[in-house]
Image: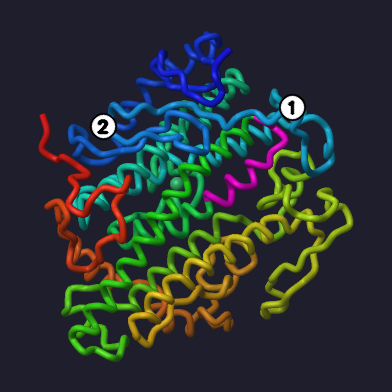
Amino acid sequence: MSDVVNVDYSTRIPNNVGLTEDRQVLRALEGWHPGYLSWWKDMGPEGFQESLVYLRTAISVDTQGWAKFDYVRMPDYRWGVLLAPREEGRKVNFGAHLGEPAWQEAPGEYRAMLRRLIVIQGDTEPASVEQQRHLGKTAPSLYDMRNLFQVNVEEGRHLWAMVYLLHKYFGRDGREEADQLLQRRSGDKDKPRMLGAFNEATPDWLSFFMFTFFTDRDGKMQLESLAQSGFDPLSRTCRFMLTEEAHHMFVGESGVGRVIERTAQAMRAAGVEDPGETARVRALGVIDLPTLQKKLNLHYSLSLDLFGSEVSTNSANFFNSGLKGRFRESKIADDHRLTDATYPVLKLVDGAITLVDEPALTALNMRLRDDYTQDCAKGVERWNRILEKSGVAFRLRLPHVAFNRAIGQFSRAHADPDGQILSDAQWAQARGAHLPSTEDGDFIASLMAAETRPGRFASWIASPKAGIDNKPGDFEYVKIENS
Ligand SMILES: [Fe+2]
Ligand SMILES: [Fe+2]
């Protein structure tokens, strides 16, 4: 028997799923491994592949001390298959199969649906690595560069996690899907990634921080609801992925927070009182707050699209069949079947934004999106506390959910960040005030000069409060020149 807490490093693929005894799956994964490595070489971080990076590697799924830190060359990172420990007697906790024992094999009648859920989740993982591959060259510090690479190797591991499920439980179909996960490319015309936000560019570090705050947080919400799955291997995989995901949230929130802090500092030092004096603020070598707001608007609205249509029979089917639950399903006090329940959904009715009660089952995307919005709002509040403390008269805010949408109810209309419906002409006029322009992008790009001296930070970002793994401020997180 394999040890479910500690990880077996005796095979090429570290795991706690007993791969040594599971020859068929081990062989399938070993067959997939070279393709993965060549994908990493082609589409993973550009440059720095020989550099020593101070990374954490999962060595256990014990909540205490699950990771160890050390210098690693990224291609040598031990991508492994790690599942949270099995809970004895776990049940299906929602839907039509409520109360039945959780499935240890893919239930035959839901096989196609389940595979689709796994493939959609799996596709986002390599996509973000592809989107972020150019950023190493312009890192504002070695600390940030290390965090980027940490996120990248872990997204790679999340791909492994989904590919393991495909190989283990879905036979030939699963193997084909696993291969295709290595073939699609973010932003590619012919073979794009499956979801919109994962085909957008991440051209600069502010985009990266916004992405990890907003888009990785969609990932967190999806993982939270898949962690509720009645298909136990999926639940266990997602539970462990969430442990890693917490760091990605941290990178995004603290990254934007440090940008805000630095801008506020520079404004104060130069005596700039009006945040709207963008030219004066930009001249200080920091990012002005209205531009930050525009970037926030963009990334939030793109991420809202990831939740799909507000009213969706797919989401009802995923829930009914016990495959995908709600955010923290097991902590919700209701019947977990939702057969008669309703949920208020924001819809576009005769051109007006209206709250309409819909059957709760078909409104599950909306509900998860609402939970997401609440989670985002807490982070924005913490950012605003930095502004408040600095005495800067500016507050960031989430735009209305109808703003800049490409999917769902509001894709059919234009709205401003307050949720006022705009005509095409009004939108064309207002757009530039609410979304980053080419010129804004050029300005941000102009700040993106690499800072590779240990303990130093680029002009536009404050240093972090603490080091990774309690390392001192001048710690060399990436040894760039190394041979
Ligand atoms: Fe991930
Ligand atoms: Fe992530």
Q: Residue 332, image x and y in percent?
A: 75, 54
In the rendered view, tell whether residue 32 sits above or below residue 312.
above
Q: Badges 2 and 1: C-beta atoms under 8 Å apart?
A: no
In terms of sequence position, does the residue under pointer 2 or pointer 1 come before the other?
2
Q: Residue 24, image x and y in percent?
A: 54, 10
| Residue span colored magenta | 219-232
In the rendered view, tell whether residue 153 sits above or below residue 457.
above
Residue 149 occupies quadrant:
top left
Q: Nearer the viewer, mark 2 or mark 1?
A: 2
Q: Is residue 45 a member of the stretch shown in magenta?
A: no
Q: Is residue 341 left or right of residue 381?
A: right
Q: Is residue 224 a member of the stretch shown in magenta?
A: yes
Label 1 near ligand 1 (CB < 8 Å): no
Residue in front for this viewpoint, 191 or 273: 273
Q: Which residue is mark 1?
A: 107
Amino acid type at mark 2:
Val
Label 2 near ligand 2 (CB < 8 Å): no
Other residues around mark 2 within 10 Å, as few (<14) / some (14–19) / many (≥20): many
Q: Main secondary structure of the magenta part?
A: helix
Task: Residue at 58%, 60% (x, y): give it.
Answer: 372
Q: CA distance from mark 2 to mark 1?
A: 40 Å
Residue 208 occupies quadrant:
bottom left
Task: Residue at 47%, 11% (x, y): give it.
Answer: 27
Q: How is the image coloured?
A: rainbow
Q: Is residue 256 left or right of residue 227?
A: left
Q: Residue 199, image x and y in percent?
A: 42, 50
In the rendered view, tell whether residue 354 sits above or below residue 238.
below
Secondary structure of residue under mark 2: strand
Q: Which residue is mark 2?
A: 72
Secondary structure of residue under mark 1: loop
